[in-house]
Image (spheres, rainbow, N blue to C red):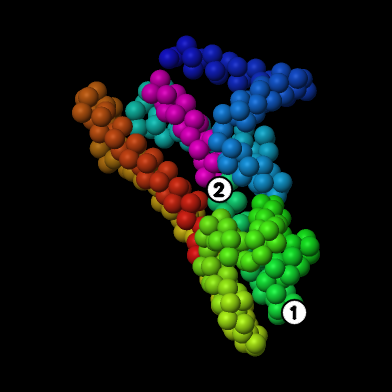
Amino acid sequence: MIESIIALSIIAFGILFLRKKGDTSMYKFLIDQTATVYDKYAPYSFRTIRQKVKDMGQEYTTKEYFVQVAIFAGMAFGITYLYFYNMFISLIYVVVVVSIIPYLTYLRCKRIFSEFIFEQIQVYTTNTIMEFQTTQNFVKAIEGVYNSGVLESPVADDVKMMIDLAYRNGDIDESIQFMNDKYDFHMTRNMHQLFLQITREGAKDSNDVLENMLLDIDVLVEGVYRDRIDRKNFHRQFIQYGLLLYAMVALVQYLIGIDNYLDLLKEPLVQIALHAIVLFNSYFLLNGEKYYNENVGAE
């Protein structure tokens, strides 16, 4: 194990040295090969999501990823060395922590993509209602939204599929079912249900109902954006609290003295207890990060 760590350290140092010297050929080769392997084995859905995040300009650059790795490795080494005063154990934790970064990238990209989809669905519903007020025809309304260019892929592609299904079947039932299954939002289901009723019952004056639905969508969107701000603030405080839990061992060392603490480290049960504390705190942070990125508050 220690040989592998040393080898990886030498390789990392060599890459950084070559990059600093301006020889980026080896550096670029390794990055390209890593990307190739990732694209081959990563789930297709996540590859699509990550590409969209890149297109939106919100993907981390290579430099930002290196900084992230350096920060995570430095914090992992510092915290675990404070617990165990053992460089070998600290290096093992560094490897484990750095290996979690791809998972955090996955969570972050999913959150950004989910927020993007919600914004696109907001645009879709709002513009469809406004188009319908002019055309009084659901298919013509979604055609107008699609042709206006306000939607982006993949929502634009799915709206095009709705249009094709409507013309192929001669009704809007399958189109609406397709969109409801693809984007399970209250505002899409409510809007589609309203248009189904208008189409089937032939309502003569639906402007008031549509205006009320626009107001409901505005209220929902305002609540979602307010929730995002609150969640970001809570997330920052949550991370600070989680990191503070790691520092409790410093308080213990201050109270009992560093020499007494080092003597305690010789006890196997103490070692096990400290590992349990580190792992529990890490699980606490990781689980909170998962909750923050997966529950985007769209509905």
For the record, the magenta segment spans: 88-108
Along the line of sight, the residue nearer the viewer: 250 or 196: 196
Residue tagged by mark 2? Answer: 110
Q: Secondary structure at mark 1?
A: helix
Q: Could you tell me how many numbered marks the image carries?
A: 2
What's under tag 2, amino acid-wise? Lys
Above or below for 225 versus 44: below
Taking the image as drawn, is residue 262 in sight? yes
Residue 203 belongs to the span the image colors magenta: no
**Horizontal side of residue 273 vs 57, given as left or right:** left
Residue 226, x across and y down, in percent: 54, 68
Residue 105 belongs to the span the image colors magenta: yes
* Label number found at residue 134: 1
Quadrant of res 62: top right
Pick out the residue farthest to the top: 3
Indicate the quadrant containing the N terminus: top left, top right, bottom left or bottom right: top left
What's under tag 1, amino acid-wise? Thr
Comparing labels 1 and 2, the label whose residue is closer to the camera: 1
Instruction: Residue at 44%, 24% (x, y): give it.
Output: 91
Residue 234, x across and y down, in percent: 46, 59
Which of pointers 1 and 2 lies earlier in the amino acid sequence? 2
Along the line of sight, the residue nearer the viewer: 282 or 126: 126
Q: CA distance from mark 1 to mark 2?
A: 36 Å
Residue 191, x across and y down, in percent: 58, 72
Above or below for 189 versus 198: above
